[in-house]
Image (cartoon, grey):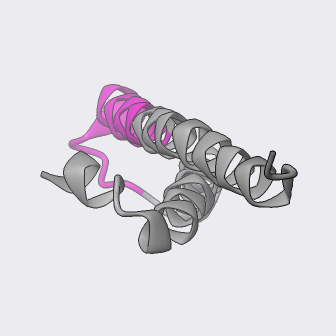
Amino acid sequence: MIYRFLRVEKVAIPAAMAFIAGGLGLLAFALAFPRFIALHSRVGTEGGDFVKGLLIGLSIAFEITGISALIPALAAKRRAGRDRDSPQL
């Protein structure tokens, strides 16, 4: 459903860029959070590693979604610009 939303031309590029920026932000948080957030002693290192891996996986998924939506949108925009600038015979 979200990917169908990304097919609309007016919102495809900003939405894809939002996915990419969100993925990068989530990746930065995933790499920095073990230093700044103290986990309970019951969770241990395994729990912290699980959360870090989960956040890194989500950030990779956001990046892939953003890039896979951005490439067709930019290609369609380029195609439309080329059609507009081409001389009519």
Q: Where does the image place residue 80, in percent across and percent down from the top left?
A: 65, 54
The answer to whether 52 appears left or right of 88 in the picture is left
Q: Is residue 33 above or below residue 76?
A: below
* Residue occupying the point 35% across, 56% down: 6
Q: Where does the image place residue 29, in percent across and percent down from the top left?
A: 58, 57
Q: Where does the image place residue 15, in percent across and percent down from the top left?
A: 47, 66
Dominant secondary-structure state across the stretch colored magenta: helix
Q: Where does the image place residue 55, in percent across and percent down from the top left?
A: 41, 43
* Residue occupying the point 25% across, 41% down: 43
Q: Is residue 44 above or below residue 73?
A: above
Residue 27 part of the magenta segment? no
Residues shaded magenta:
39-59
* Residue occupying the point 57% across, 38% down: 67
Res 77 → quadrant? bottom right
Res 63 → quadrant? top right
Quadrant assignment for the C terminus: top right
